[in-house]
Image: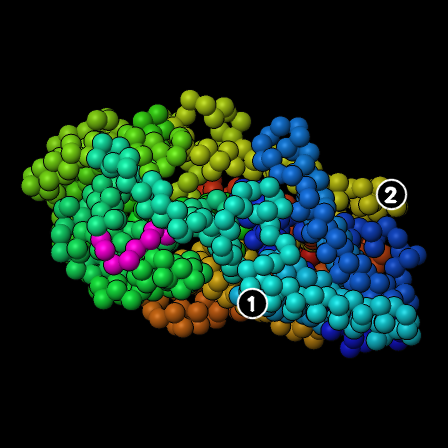
Amino acid sequence: MPPEARPQLQTYIGLFLVTLATLMQQILLTRIFSVTMWYHFAFMAISICMFGMTVGAIIVYLRPKVFTVESAPRQLALNALYYAFTTIVSFLVYLQIPFIGDASLLGISLLTLSYIVVSIPFVFSGIVVSIALTKFPNYVSRLYAADLIGAACGCILLIYTLEWTDGPTAVVVVAALAALAAFTFTLATPTGPLRMLALGATVLLAIGAVVHTGMVRDQRPLIRISKVRGLDNTGNRYERWNSFSRVHVNGDPNQPRPPVGWGLSEKTVSPNVQIPQLGMAIDVWAGTVITKFDGDLGPVSFLKEDVTNLAHYLRPNADVFVIGVGGGRDVLSALVFDQKSVRGVEINENVLRATNEAFGEFSGHLDRHPKVKFAVDEARSYITRSDERFDIIQISLIDTWAATAAGAFVLTENSLYTVQAWKTFLQRLKPNGVLTVSRWYYTSRPGEVYRTASLAREALREIGVSNPRDHVIIARAPRASGMPGKFGNGIGTIMVSPSPFSAQDVATLQREVDRLGFELTLTPDSSESDVFETILSDADLTEFFDSLPIDVSAPTDDKPFFFQMLRFRDFAKPLTGSFLDPNKVNLESIRMLGLILITVFVLTILCILVPVALTSGFGQLKGSLPLLLYFLSIGFGFMFIEISQMQRLMVFLGHPTYALSVVLFTLLLGGGVGSYLTEKLPQGSGDGGRRVALAAVVASLVVFGFVTQWVVEGFAGSTTAVRIAAAASILLSMGLFMGMPFPIGMRSAAGRAEALTPWLWGINGAASVTCTVVATVVALTWGISASFWTGVAFYLAAFASYIWWRRSGGG
């Protein structure tokens, strides 16, 4: 290799900054899409970003005379500057594109246009990374290490950026980092004008980010996404972002109106009752309310007439545990019932900040009430670590409409609605305690309540209950006045107890539901549906569940997809006439997933075949088939492992921010270290060390597949610091091995097919594009464990492909 092919220090630093900005932007787009589109569209952000980078790699492959070793320093700087410029422009253009969100020709066309626009910056990012990793093959181990470590740091930096400012400003921060990377690259070139342009862009973007942050903190930013997207922004009063949500509060605090509730009685709540309330939205669509409270419980006594609060009639003078505080409605309900104490746990600090600080005077500073204590934590993790026992644990319509940053890779996983979660909740109740969970319950669409009944059955069996029917009561508000339109109908509450409900319990509830105009749909002695009786029986339910049009079996931690009841094999069937979610959007996302899978598969094939067809023809593909399979396999393998570990550890770590920072950061950081270590492996014919390294990758993943499950179960009740340390130890070790295959493959390919290396890098990226969808399909259909072991199988295939390549005379 000639001396001029040695990358300078500026190349490593610039590559670090580009991949840092790229990972920040990838995750940031999932947050922005979650605000501007439905979550199953936001899910595609990562695939679109990876596709843009793959296109960048293909451009490098198709234009070898432009992207040469000699021109590499200037091309790195120029394309990093293009990346910075297009990041701003594409974002502003995207905000002007309407979002319809349906399957009409116009809706699909606009969605496609949006994806194309946001993918453009990643094309230039992909060009930069491809140049760096393919034009200096002897140093790819160090360069790939800089790539992965930069991406790892991007995870952490985005978390703090979104604590500091909002989403649109974070886009400017990303552009500033890309411009700084361009300036760094120019230090390795004699080009003065390009250097000054990059420096000027860096300074201007940095100043713009600081100035706009000040405007954001004064609640007067230049760009409000909800306004640009055409959503109703009347009365906007507050907006705050973090790494997994955007919290938005609007309304008139001085305007009394009919109370908003989830299942208020039409029979007893007077139409003359009015009270000021503010609306709070998480990522636009997940709603809650902040109710005016001045210490007088009289004006909020209507909360006694909500189907979600029936358990309070059964257990007076109770210690109450509220999961998902939101605007404080369930906490306030416990105070209305004069309960002994209330512990409210909310995963989103910004929600509590809005309720208790920004609007504390309006909400009555519930955090200062002597009976109330709040905690910012993931409720399941919190209660697992707690030694306290409660009389009532309440979960009222807690959805994943507010997706986590980690959940951007998947669809609707929810750690609160699994057998293992409900087992934990039941174990933290006092002997006669009640777990009360409220969900949508339409008589024509009872899927969610059927599924909660399945959860109750399995969780009760897990704690040793032989006859679950005696431990479950379900009530329904057939028409609830608290929510407008169709959302005001059909709220069901399931109450589950470790001890059998007594005749007095049933009589108490019967008296109250008669008074309120509700219905008891299931008691230990009666049921309005044979389905409930079957689910809560001691029969084998396998055939019964298969006979239903949707899947209402109990979700587990390995398949925590409570809201996805449509089986993937049924995605082409009509949705009408099924037991569906009243929103339908959660289940329609399965159909969208199928269409996306087909699309990304076609795009992946095109990424493989078109570049070859445009250059040397398909004859070269025959000799390079082992390399093709190798890079496809490690691309699929890495993403399968990454996504499955993130899904598996999200519950264990107890907070989406921890899942994002610990899982992504430590896995990528470990990968960077592993890549660097491959530089010591011998080149040429003595490749025994490389084979041993690749075999060690497969062996280590098999070991860690079992170790991870043991750690999750064994350390579930440990402190947050201990759980983070345990997870980080596993992920760093896994990442170290997973960082080795790519540089090994690139150095091996450079020995005989150096011209193909940009194409091979693109193949690796194309596999990642596809895998973000395929891994979700595997997890939804067969579980997270199956997704993990599929990743292991791909690494085994990569090892076999490498042996094939070497035996066929590969370098």
- Residue in the image at 35% along x and 34% along y: 488
Q: Residue 296 colored magenta?
A: yes
Mark found first going from the N terminus, 2 or 1: 1
Image quadrant in which you'd find residue 361: bottom left
Q: Is residue 611 left or right of residue 588?
A: right
Graded by Cα atoms within 10 Å as few (under 14), some (14 to 19) or many (20 or more), the crowding at tag 1 reads: some
Mark number, residue 471: none
> Where does residue 89 sit, x and y in percent of width and height?
75, 53
Q: Which residue is mark 1?
A: 164
Q: Is residue 580 above or below residue 247?
A: above
What secondary structure is the magenta-colored segment mainly?
loop
Image quadrant in which you'd find residue 126: bottom right
Q: Residue 534 colored magenta?
A: no
Q: Is residue 396 visible?
A: yes
Q: Is residue 185 above or below residue 238?
A: below
Q: Is residue 559 visible?
A: no
- Residue in the image at 83% along x and 55% along y: 60
Q: Which residues are magenta?
A: 290-297
Q: Mark 2, mark 1: which one is toward the viewer? A: 1
> Where does residue 623 sit, x and y in percent of width and height?
80, 49
Outermost residue on the bottom side: it is 9
Residue 684 or residue 382, whichever sits in front: 382
Badge 1 element:
helix
Q: Which residue is mark 2?
A: 614
Tell me the kind of residue under disc 2.
Answer: Leu
